[in-house]
Amino acid sequence: MYKILTLGCMFISFLVGCTPKTVISPSYDFNQMNRIGIMAFETPYSSVQGVENLFAKYLIRAGFKVVERAQLESVLQEHGLSVSGYLSPETTREIGRILGVDTILVGEVSSYTPSRTELTTTTSHRTESRPVYTQEIVTLPDGTQTSYMRKTGTQVSRSFEERPTSYTISAEVGVIAKLVDVETAEIVWIGSLNSSSPNALEAADHVAKRLVKSFSKELTKKRENL
């Protein structure tokens, strides 16, 4: 099986977090990249489908020319090409020749945790203080008696109430995306990110937006340093 060899052990540094983890090839000439083909992202989760379409949206918005996955997959089927596992140089070159793309974006949904509702118990405490009075009788000089109430202390009572409380934990989606050169099958950029949101689609959309933005910034910086 052909293994794409580039950027090597740098990929080991990809860890889960709220900040995009990305690596861009320092030697690749991105000036030759005019069109990007996008493959369907692999996912074992039925609730997280079509992530590649989110990347296409943000790549187009960032000014890149994109060949959508439906057209790309149609060409693959027509020419009997397979993209299971790693992309071989022969396959990527054939895709590039037929569709006129320079790079291919491939990816996978690496993790998914659905949103869920948790139930907990909230305890509220209450303290109440009340004055305590004692009746006292006093004999007046004329021999008559009268009574009055005198405060002799404070009575403190404590109580608590337990109430069930529910809260929602957001869904979390993790994505790894790779940009592959069609001539060499070299990975020229890779990014990963986990994101949480009330539902899986919003989380995946946030991942795509942040990763494309990160790639655009890296690409601009690289071109400025040439």
Image (cartoon, rainbow, N blue to C red):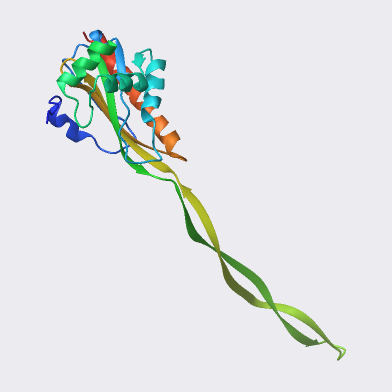
Q: Is residue 49 left or right of residue 147?
A: left
Residue lying at 34% horizontally and 22% vertically, measured from the top left: 69
- Residue 44: x %, y % from top left: 32, 40
Quadrant where the N terminus sits is top left
Query: With respect to residue 105, does 161 lie above or below?
Result: below
Q: Indicate the quadrant where residue 201 lies.
A: top left
- In this view of the protein, which residue sits in the foreground, 169 or 37? 37
- Residue 111: x %, y % from top left: 32, 41
- Residue 159: x %, y % from top left: 58, 70
Residue lying at 56% horizontally and 68% vertically, measured from the top left: 160
Number of numbered discs overlaid on the protein picture: 0
- Residue 121: x %, y % from top left: 50, 62
Quadrant where the C terminus sits is top left
Residue lying at 16% horizontally and 30% vertically, measured from the top left: 10
**From this viewpoint, is residue 75 visible?**
yes
Q: Is residue 56 left or right of residue 179?
A: right
- In this view of the protein, which residue sits in the foreground, 88 or 55? 88
